[in-house]
Image (spheres, rainbow, N blue to C red):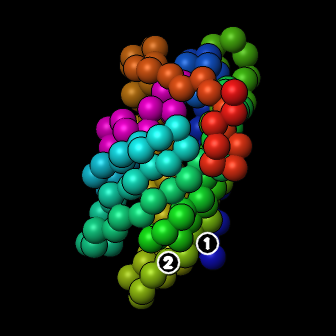
Amino acid sequence: MPTIEESIEVEVPVTTAYNQWTQFEEFPSFMEGVERIEQTDDAHLHWVVEFGGERHEWDAEITEQIPDERVAWKNTDGKENAGVVTFHRLNDERTKIMVQMDWVPEGIKESIGSALGFDNRRVTGDLQRFKELIESRGVESGAFRGEVDRGQRIG
């Protein structure tokens, strides 16, 4: 199972970066190949993605979400993947975002693409586009400040 680990520093406060990241339905605006994400409740998402010339759909569950710190997920069907995005305050106006993700390539194209590092480059590009998006706006388009534990909203 390939592991992707990438990070980027953004020139916005940690709360701004985190709040924008929780706007999952806006991921297509910066994530390559993501056609659509539907958030069905506080902890469940349906993904529609194109890569390797093929369309993939799967459902995912947010397993842990702590405001300004982390969002972790795992698939519940379809494309096997899991990971965590963490947010690190560097100072009042600068944040480091770290992505750690595991996924299982399906078929020869995905396996070769992963071996050649295409998956890492895609995540690096997605993070760069997120940086450009949030720094150009300077403010988040929305926020989810609730906590999630094992797929259930807390409080």
Cα distance between the residues tagged 1 and 2: 8 Å
To which quarter of the image does residue 81 belong? bottom right
To which quarter of the image does residue 138 belong? top left
The N terminus: image quadrant: bottom right
Give the residue drawn at x 72%, y 23%. Answer: 89
- Mark 2 lies on a secondary structure that is loop
Residue under numbered circle 1: 2
Residue under numbered circle 2: 105
Give the residue drawn at x 63%, y 36%. Answer: 153
Asked if residue 108 is among those painted magenta in the image, a careful observer would answer: no
Q: Are marks 1 and 2 in contact (CB under 8 Å)?
A: yes
Q: Where is residue 149 shown, x and y percent of the image?
A: 71, 43
Point out the stretch of residues depicted in magenta: 19-29
Asked if residue 26 is among those painted magenta in the image, a careful observer would answer: yes
Q: Amino acid at mark 2?
A: Pro
Q: Is residue 131 visible?
A: no
Q: Is residue 80 visible?
A: yes
Location of residue 87 with respect to 126 vertically, above or below: above
Q: Where is residue 51 shown, x and y percent of the image?
A: 33, 66
